[in-house]
Image (cartoon, rainbow, N blue to C red):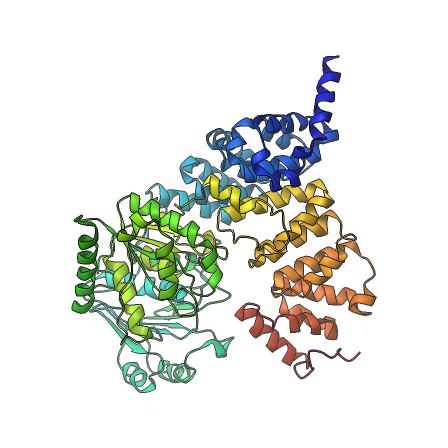
Amino acid sequence: MKWANLTSRLINSITRTDFEPVAILEHPQSVTPETVKSIVRALGFKRFERKALASLAAVLLVRPEHGKHVPASVLERQLKSDRFPGLWQKLALLLLHTDQRSAVAQWLNAQWIEQSEKDGTLSLLEHVSAWFPETLNRNQLLAIAESKNSAPYAALYQRQSFFEQVNPAAKADGEFERLLRPGFKLLIIHNIVDGLGDEIIRTGAIAQAFLDAHPDNEVVLFTDRLFLYEHPRVHVHSIRDNQQFNEELEKQWNGIINFFEPYLPENSYNLEIQARLRERLVSLTPSIYVQARKDVNHYVFESIKIENTEYAQQWNLQKRLLPLNYDTTMRFISHLGLPLRTGEEIAKAGNIYACNPNSQVQQTWQDIKDTFESRHKQKGRPIAIINAFGGQTALKGFQRSQYGQLAKILSQLIEQGYDLVLVAIRESWGSREEIDAILTALPEKHRVHAISAPASEADNAQQKMRRIISFVALADHIVTVEGWMMHLAYSMGKKYDLLMAPRSQKAEWQPHGRSANQGNALKITQEQQCSNFALPLKDGSTPPLLHYPAKDLFNAAIGIWRMTADRYLAQRLLYWMGSADPDIRKGVIAAVGSIDTAFFQTELLKALQDCNREVRASAASSLLSADRDLRNELGEDWKNVLEAYRLLGEFRFQELRPLAHAAYRPLRACLNNDEFEVNRDAKIMLEAMNMSKLEAHKKPPP
C-alpha cells in the first residue's frame, strides 16, 4: 500500500506542468525544493527516469541553489547503472556549480582512479582541474598518470604540481654546460606569421632562458614585432630588413634558431632571408642550430643539431608529448640545461619584454597614480590592468551586450582594493569608445576607481602596443581574457585572473607552469547562471553569449538532454541556434539530430549552410547516421557530399580528393566567414582539385 501511494504521488508530480524541463527553463522561479525532491525520487523508477534526468539538468542550470536537495547518492546510482553511459560525469559537473560542491568533490575524489578509463571522466577531471584545483589530490593524479601512461593525465598531474608550487620538470645533467658558456651569442629568426601569444610562448621563452643562463649572453632577434621586446641584451631588427639580416648573418654565432614553416611558405614574413640563411650555413657552423616550425600549433622542433649531432628525435621534440602548446618549448629549454622560469618566478636577467620602460612611459604611469589619488583621496591602492577584448576574434572577449556582467566583475575587483586601468586593443572591437561604455556601466560609486589607459594620438600601432606592454609590467595585477596578454603576464611572473570568453582556448593553450595565483579565478554567480540559461517566452530573442564555465555547464546539460529523447525540449533548444558562438550551435544541432533526425531534417539541412565548418559537420554526421535518401535535397552523390562536410569539420582536407566534385559545395562553404586557416586551405584544395574557377551558384559538372 505504501509503495502504491508513493508511485501515485510520483505520477501526480510528474504530470504537473512545472515538472517539465521546458517549463523549468521558461519559469525558473516556479521551481521549489519540493519539485526538486520529487525529481530525485522519480530517478529511482525506470518508467520516469528519462524525464526526471532532463528536469534535473534544467533545475541545476537555472536554480543552482537547489542543488543542496540533490544527494551524492544520485551520482552513485547513475555510476552503477549502464542505462545512460557517461551521464554521471555530466551530472557531477552540473552539481559542482551548486551548493553541493563540497560533497560532490569529496565523492569524486573516491572515484578518479577507478573510473578514469570511462568515457567522459577525463573531460570532467579537466574541468575540475581548471575551476576547482584546490579539491584535487596531486598524488592521486600521479597514480592515474603512471597507471594509464596517458599524456592528458600526465599534463593534469604536472599542472597540479605547479599549482601546489612543486616543480615536476626533470633536471638536465649539465651535458651542454661547456657549449653554453658565458658570452653565448644567439641569433633567432622568427619568420612565421602567427599570433602574438604564439611568439611569446616560443621565441620569447627561449630568448629569456638564454639570457637568464648568464649575464654576458646576448640575443639578436629578427621579428615583425619590434614593439614586443625591450631589454639591453636583446637587439631587435625587422624580419623584412634584408640588408640588416645579411650584415648580422656574416657574424660568428654560437647558436641560430630559425622559426620557419617550410611546408607553407605563404605563412612567412620574408622568404628571401631563408635562401640567404641556407647559403650561409654552408660556411657557418654554429655550435647549436635549431629548425622549428608551428605544425598546426604544436610548435615542434624539426632539427636540433648540437656540434653536428641531431637531438630533435632523441629528445622526442618532433612532436608534442603532452596536449599542451607549452610542452615542446619547456622540454627544449630543460634538455639544454637552461633556466626554466615558471609561475611567479622573476626572470634572472630581467623580463625581456619590459626590462627598462622608458621615462615617458614611467611618467605616464605616475600620472595614472596621481589621477586616482586625486579622484578618491586614497594613497597606495594597487593598480590592475584590465583587458576585456579578444585579439583574434571579437568572441574571445566581451561584447557590448555583456558589459553589465563585466561591470559586476570589475566592481568586485574595486571592492577588493584595486584601481583599474582598462586598455583598448584595436579599433574594430575593443576601442576606447567601448571602454567608455564599460565605464558607464559601472555603479557610480566605483567609477572613480576605473579609467581608460591614456594613449598618445601620435603613437602608431607598434608604439601603442609597446605602451600597453609597459603598463602590464608596471601593474600590480592583470585581469585579461585568454590570449596574448595572458601569455605576457605569465612570462613576467605576474599574478593574473583569467576571463574565459566564448571562444577562449582551454588548458592546451594556457601557460603550463602557472601558480595558484595565475589562471581561472573568476567564476559566474548563481544569479548570472539563472539569467544565462532561462528560455525566453517570446520569439525573436537573441541567446546570451556564454563564457566559461557557463559554456561547460550548457554542454553538460545538452549531453543529458540528448539521452532523454524529448522532442519538444529539442524544439525549444533550437532557440540557441541564434547564438553567435559556433560551439553552442554545434552542440544544439548534434542534440536535435540525436533525438530525432527525421523530425529535424529541415533544421539539419539548414545547418549545412552555417558559417562554421564544425556546425556543418555536426549536421552532416546526423544526416549520414540516419541514412535517409537525400538525393532530392543534395543530389545523386548526397552521401559523398555529407562525407565531405564531415571531413572538413575534422580539418581532413587531403581526404577530400576521392570524393571529387561532391566536395565542391562543402569546400565553397569554407569561404564564408570560416576561420582563416580553413578559408586558406579550402582555396588550396579547390585549386588542387581543378574547381577554383567554378561559380558558386552553378552546380559542378558531373
Image quadrant holding the N terminus, namely top right
Image quadrant holding the C terminus, namely bottom right
Residue 221 placement (x, y as % from top left)? 30, 73
Residue 408 placement (x, y as % from top left)? 39, 47
Is 208 left, or right, of 40 in this rendering? left
Q: Is residue 535 above or below residue 371?
A: above
**Observer able to see residue 352:** no
Q: Is residue 318 above or below residue 8?
A: below
Q: Observer-nearest residue: 610 or 80?
A: 610
Residue ranking furthest to the top: 1
Q: Observer-nearest residue: 488 or 529?
A: 529
Residue ranking furthest to the bottom: 243
Q: Observer-nearest residue: 84 or 658?
A: 84
Residue 433 placement (x, y as % from top left)? 37, 65
| Residue under the image location 18 percent in, 64 percent down | 362
Q: How many marks on residues?
A: 0
**Observer able to see residue 1:** yes
| Residue under the image location 67 percent in, 48 percent down | 572
| Residue under the image location 49 percent in, 30 percent down | 100
Residue 179 placement (x, y as % from top left)? 27, 65
Q: Residue 677, located in which quarter of the rendered image?
A: bottom right
Q: Is residue 62 above or below residue 465?
A: above
Q: Residue 628, located in which quarter of the rendered image?
A: bottom right
